[in-house]
Amino acid sequence: METSPLALPFPALPAIAGVTPRVARARYKNWDRCDLTFVTLEPGTSVAGVLTNSKCPSPEVEWCRKALVLGRARALVVNAGNSNAFTGNRGRAAVEAIAARAAAHLGCEPSDIFVSSTGVIGVPLPIDKAEAGLDAAFTAEPASWEAAAETIMTTDTFAKAAVTSAVVDGRTVNLVGIIKGSGMIAPDMATMLGFIFTDAAVDPVFLQRALADANTRTFSCITVDGDTSTSDTVLAFATGKAGNAPLTSEEDAGADAFRAALADLCHQLALLVVRDGEGATKLIQIDVEGAESDRSAHRIALSIANSPLVKTAIAGEDANWGRVVMAVGKAGEPAERDKLAIRFGTTQVAREGLAVEGYDEAPVAAHLKGKEIEIGVDLGLGEGHAKVWTCDLTHGYISINADYRS
Amino acid sequence: METSPLALPFPALPAIAGVTPRVARARYKNWDRCDLTFVTLEPGTSVAGVLTNSKCPSPEVEWCRKALVLGRARALVVNAGNSNAFTGNRGRAAVEAIAARAAAHLGCEPSDIFVSSTGVIGVPLPIDKAEAGLDAAFTAEPASWEAAAETIMTTDTFAKAAVTSAVVDGRTVNLVGIIKGSGMIAPDMATMLGFIFTDAAVDPVFLQRALADANTRTFSCITVDGDTSTSDTVLAFATGKAGNAPLTSEEDAGADAFRAALADLCHQLALLVVRDGEGATKLIQIDVEGAESDRSAHRIALSIANSPLVKTAIAGEDANWGRVVMAVGKAGEPAERDKLAIRFGTTQVAREGLAVEGYDEAPVAAHLKGKEIEIGVDLGLGEGHAKVWTCDLTHGYISINADYRS
């Protein structure tokens, strides 16, 4: 698979005190690459998470949902190549076996172990391979962040990570995230596997609120194909090794800085997923304003972002704003045709329900030839606004998905 | 454009007493083909219609919505190559000019003239071309049904029509329909331009109920790309020339036969649109049963039918039932993973939330190599069921839509 033309270079990432990634070959598929990631977290680590809204979630998602209630973590295990979704009791048994083995190794409770898997649906994760992979990981040398980000990949074409920091209680805390995902991406919550690590000391309840809040403005605002995975998971781990007084509420000094840094990290990670959207050649930002509410704006933005006709028009570098009108019209949200305004980049192409007479096509054509496209819609009704991000729909998407073996 | 591999031959259609189609060249685009259809209807013709739910409808749709209230029709004008949607006052003026000119020609009210347009959004329909085209149509020889069906085409690759009949009040009544549509097809109601003509005598209020009822089971159950046009329109005209006692209610003798025939005709027409879905190589029927309600079943069926991952899997002849699970899970409707059963054709591939151990892959592979694919989902929850039809998602869809000029 060729690397996405929208790929970004892998960033320089600091170590996070209390976090040690390792990788190993479980050989879930017939390949010779690392496909099992094992990240140990020192005692005292808080955890928060957001999980898929799918009614058919994987047993890993169900496991994490239960374990999150306790708010503490000692390790993360990520399997690539097999999602273990829709595998009944055998799938549940595989997750339990992994958690038990890692817990025995670390001398902790199985509920301290978080497990995620990604790949084919419907094939039970082979327990023997998982256990052998784990055993290899236990004794492996610590791995780089880049190796960990590569090990969680499936159809991804580049390894994805982001970094930021904040000053909390006079201490600089670091936040690092790795993420994978390029298809089955839709914003009905988390949308992929993403893992965030920070050395900040953060109470798990506060961490959960901060992550959920960041999620609504980042991971829940991206879509590649409108398809929501059975396994979507974002987990955030806070080791507390930075030594700040633990953050427990929005009122604490540094809470705002931490929340902003977490949201920034989530934003970076979410956009990396869109940049690796299957077959993507353009990153598209949809700005909707003037809607009756933020929620309504969000739905209209998604209707545009998920429209195959809009996405193919952008692939063809065609300023086909009529398809944007169509997508606004089908969203089922309040809209008045004769108040609608649409822009591509900074050029207004339609206003008050019709084309802007003689608008300059040159800057629009130039904008559409770029790799980062902006479509703006003003509904002229109220104060509601929203931003979502998607990619174009190209032959590459078809090639990838008509071939990917079930 | 190559003809769809799913195309059907144009059927032999009878004349409908009281209905005379004519075609002409308005040259809405730079082409040398007929693109204006003018169908006269003798006095006494009833009319019913279903129109797009888009919040940004074309002025033609608004015109028809108003005129339908009166229930009578003297002519239908269809323009191909320009949808006249999102064109403000100038678009409205074009529709009014067309209705006025046809009404003057026929000596009737403008509200007796029904107008539909299809094609590019955002360019006002040129009134001078429409008027010259109409004048040419007024004096043209009557055209065949096939010529009329060809004249309303845009990106369609074959002319589409269907025929049926019923016995009402001892008389055989004929029903003929022509239809166009191959992209921007989604079932938020009508989905394309379809026109039905019958010589039956039918009260417009009853005709409206019968058409709306047929619509919910036919046109509203097809999707090509989940995109809903600004111009979707289905109109049914009944001239009364068959001489039956007019149908006015469901209790009348022959009412059931007429309703069944109308529904059959709508079903045939709707499937023709899917057969000409942009880039389609497979016609896919999704049967959902065991849902909590019919409405819930319909939504789940559409979630499957609109999933790009399901549609590309079928294009690749891949029995990737995991993607069906994904689509069920994301529909947001009641579902329990461990009760879910899935079949391809007649072969059960998953049951009680996991793959059927050692199911025979040969008949599944053979089924997927065919042109007509059936996916069955049983939710195991209740009695709700629904059927929808879609097509696969192929490179052809991308080629057509990344090039079609705005």
Image (cartoon, coloured by chain):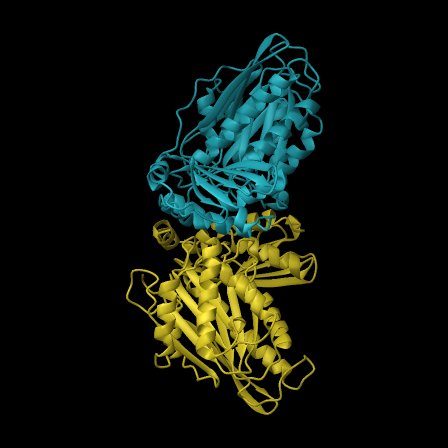
Chain colours: A cyan, B yellow
Looking at the image, which residue is at 46% across and 31% down?
A272
x, y (%) of residue A279? Answer: 39, 41
- Specify the farthest residue to the bottom: B170
- Side (left or right) of A340 relative to B80: right
Q: Quadrant of residue A294?
A: top right
x, y (%) of residue B343? Answer: 55, 59
Q: Quadrant of residue B190?
A: bottom right
Q: Nearer the viewer, residue A17 or B355?
A: A17
Residue B151 visible? The answer is: no
Q: Quadrant of residue A77?
A: top right
Above or below, comparing residue A404 to residue A264 in the picture: below
x, y (%) of residue B224? Answer: 47, 58
Above or below, comparing residue B296 to residue B105 in the picture: above
- Side (left or right) of B400 relative to A134: left
Residue B2 visible? The answer is: yes
Looking at the image, which residue is at 45% across and 40% down?
A343
**How many numbered marks appear?**
0
Quarter of the N terminus of chain B within the rendering: bottom left
- Side (left or right) of A152 relative to A240: left
Q: Nearer the viewer, residue A140 or B401?
A: B401
Q: Nearer the viewer, residue B377 or A171?
A: A171
Q: Nearer the viewer, residue A164 or A300?
A: A300
Looking at the image, which residue is at 35% across and 52% down?
B405
Above or below, comparing residue A308 to residue A201 in the picture: below
x, y (%) of residue B257? Answer: 60, 82
